[in-house]
């Protein structure tokens, strides 16, 4: 944001196919290696060519994981930029654009950057993104030689001529910025001191894949559907290294049934999809409930109904997963809020599914999955893997009644027992039954594990001093970073936050923190699905709902504005 000298926000805009993500992909490792904290997020239209897409890159003095609507520097590659981003552009925004291309759209804070001419001089329009990257490096004072090493590595397979052309393009952009008047100099945040823990660059998809591998995941089945496909492609790319069976199913029904079959055979299985694909999986979810077979279902959320906005972000699937599948059976729902938390929660999701023999839902969204940030190597932690599979005997009964409702889990071929499962109601041995008495016992058995699930639920993460605050700002999933930064910026002892990464069942102690406080819930949907759940769980009315369902994430500025309204209200 402009008023924060420890934060610089760059936005790159262009049509699909112009390579704006290439610019940030090139700059991120260079900035990270130069000691800066970086965060990048993308938004793009659902088209292969054309349109207007943007990538935001924040360079910060301390770790940030939130979207900012303020723009310090805009590099516009299409004339649609000024109209489309007018709500984010103000007098403090420097706009780099090709005046010849923009014509009447030209503004007073625009800097004429002859991008077309410079790219053509380098070898063609494809080199425009390299020109921009070179210009940015000069603007922030990083030698172009650091960029050349990246270009050499990235393009060496395409031949020396391509590498040389990119060198030339980067140099042209660098020289263009160097010749600008000194009044255009910018103040950068102070870079971190070198040393300490190694810092990595990671997006949400990679974090989810790493967490799944650490959890011992060895089977994935999916019918591709954005934004959930990233987990499928990550695990497929590393399948050979980690012994993962990858099944690209013919549809979502086949995907979840394949996952259940693999789990029945002893695999630690996951399926990945989005809301529309998950609609087709609900009968399989119900099957998991009655056969008491663990399965992790990852849902990368995007706006509905129907196809909705297929490349945008939303938190609209909570109500869906809470009630998915016919009948009554236990489940758990998680929604991590940071890259590091994705790695941790993915492992917890597999562990909970295995321990309680239930379907577990892992909710992310397009914004969180595509966002890239720095992460310290120490934040990547491997949690213990506890296998619940036993060796069966001839007396084995798959659905044996126990005090906690959890029967010993056997798998075919491991021991002498028969591991019988059935989608009809059944007795302890898995044999179909019509007995009303047995039905009553089986329903009670399945639901009994909810007592332990609730007792072991993950607590909400406090943001600020919750015990002393009069107002609590509640968030879940990807809104953690934006709430953390807004509360820090607002800096009021009367306000604090609670971030829930486990949405169901909710931990009783965390719910008690909401008692006798003013509670505000912020979430990316139109009705306030988590607010409704809190009311259902606590019996109290939520004082205020801050909601957004445009397909965009919340910005820091929007949350700060909401907090100012509270204080002035």
Image (cartoon, rainbow, N blue to C red):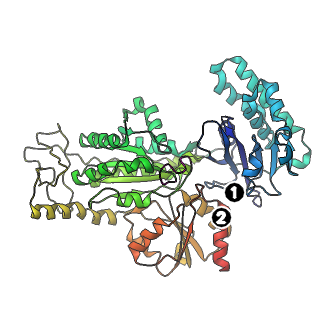
To which residue does mark 2 refer? 558
Q: How many marks?
A: 2
Quarter of the picture holding the C terminus: bottom right
The answer to whether any part of residue 122 appears in the image is: yes
> Answer yes or no: do the residues labelled 1 and 2 have beta carbons within 8 Å?
yes
Q: Which residues are magenta?
A: 303-311
Classified by dominant secondary structure, the portion drawn in magenta counts as loop
Image height check: is 152 above or below 386?
above
Q: Is residue 283 magenta?
A: no
Residue 545, image x and y in percent? 54, 71
**Circle 1: element type:** loop
Badge 2 density bin: few <14, some 14–19, many ≥20, Cα 10 Å: some
Residue 389, image x and y in percent? 23, 46
Residue 175, image x and y in percent? 85, 34
Q: Is residue 310 magenta?
A: yes
In this image, 141 relative to 501: left or right? right
To which residue does mark 1 refer? 69
**Circle 2: element type:** helix
């Amino acid at each position: 944001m402009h008023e924060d000298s420890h934060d610089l926000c760059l936005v790159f805009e262009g049509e699909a196919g112009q390579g704006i993500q290439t610019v940030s992909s090139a700059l991120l490792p260079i900035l990270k290696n130069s000691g800066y904290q970086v965060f990048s997020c993308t938004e793009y239209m659902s088209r292969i060519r054309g349109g207007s897409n943007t990538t935001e890159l924040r360079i910060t003095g301390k770790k940030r994981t939130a979207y900012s609507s303020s723009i310090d520097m805009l590099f516009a590659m299409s004339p649609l930029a000024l109209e489309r981003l007018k709500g984010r552009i103000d007098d403090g925004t420097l706009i780099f654009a090709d005046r010849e291309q923009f014509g009447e759209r030209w503004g007073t804070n625009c800097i004429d950057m002859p991008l077309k001419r410079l790219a053509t001089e380098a070898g063609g329009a494809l080199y425009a993104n390299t020109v921009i990257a070179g210009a940015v490096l000069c603007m922030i004072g990083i030698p172009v030689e650091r960029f050349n090493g990246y270009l050499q590595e990235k393009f060496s397979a395409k031949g020396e001529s391509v590498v040389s052309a990119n060198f030339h393009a980067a140099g042209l952009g660098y020289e263009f910025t160097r010749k600008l008047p000194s009044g255009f100099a910018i103040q950068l945040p102070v870079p971190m001191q070198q040393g300490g823990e190694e810092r990595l660059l990671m997006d949400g998809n990679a974090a989810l894949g790493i967490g799944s591998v650490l959890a011992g995941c060895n089977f994935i089945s999916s019918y591709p559907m954005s934004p959930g496909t990233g987990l499928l492609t990550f695990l497929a790319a590393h399948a050979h290294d980690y012994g993962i069976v990858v099944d690209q199913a013919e549809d979502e029904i086949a995907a979840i049934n394949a996952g259940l079959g693999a789990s029945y055979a002893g695999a630690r299985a996951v399926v990945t999809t989005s809301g529309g694909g998950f609609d087709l999986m609900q009968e399989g979810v119900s099957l998991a409930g009655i056969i008491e077979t663990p399965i992790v279902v990852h849902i990368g959320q995007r706006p509905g109904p129907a196809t909705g906005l297929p490349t945008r972000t939303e938190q609209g699937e909570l109500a869906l997963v809470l009630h998915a599948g016919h009948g009554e059976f236990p489940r758990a729902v998680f929604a991590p809020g940071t890259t590091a938390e994705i790695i941790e929660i993915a492992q917890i999701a597999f562990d909970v599914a295995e321990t309680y023999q239930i379907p577990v839902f892992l909710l992310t969204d397009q914004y969180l999955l595509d966002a890239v940030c720095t992460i310290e190597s120490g934040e990547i932690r491997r949690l213990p893997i506890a296998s619940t599979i036993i060796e069966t005997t001839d007396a084995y009964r798959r659905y044996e009644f126990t005090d906690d409702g959890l029967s010993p889990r056997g798998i075919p071929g491991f021991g002498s027992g028969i591991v019988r499962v059935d989608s009809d109601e059944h007795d302890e041995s898995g044999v179909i039954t019509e007995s009303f008495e047995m039905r009553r016992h089986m329903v009670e058995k399945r639901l009994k594990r909810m007592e332990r699930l609730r007792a072991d639920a993950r607590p909400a993460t406090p943001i600020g001093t919750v015990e002393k605050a009069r107002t609590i700002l509640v968030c879940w999933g990807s809104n953690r970073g934006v709430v953390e930064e807004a509360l820090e910026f607002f800096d009021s002892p009367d306000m604090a936050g609670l971030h829930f990464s486990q949405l169901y069942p909710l931990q009783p102690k965390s719910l008690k923190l909401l008692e006798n406080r003013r509670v505000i819930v912020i979430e990316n949907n139109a009705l306030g699905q988590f607010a409704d759940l809190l009311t259902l769980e606590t019996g109290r009315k939520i004082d205020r709902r801050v909601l957004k369902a445009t397909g965009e994430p919340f910005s820091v500025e929007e949350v700060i504005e909401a907090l100012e309204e509270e204080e002035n209200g």
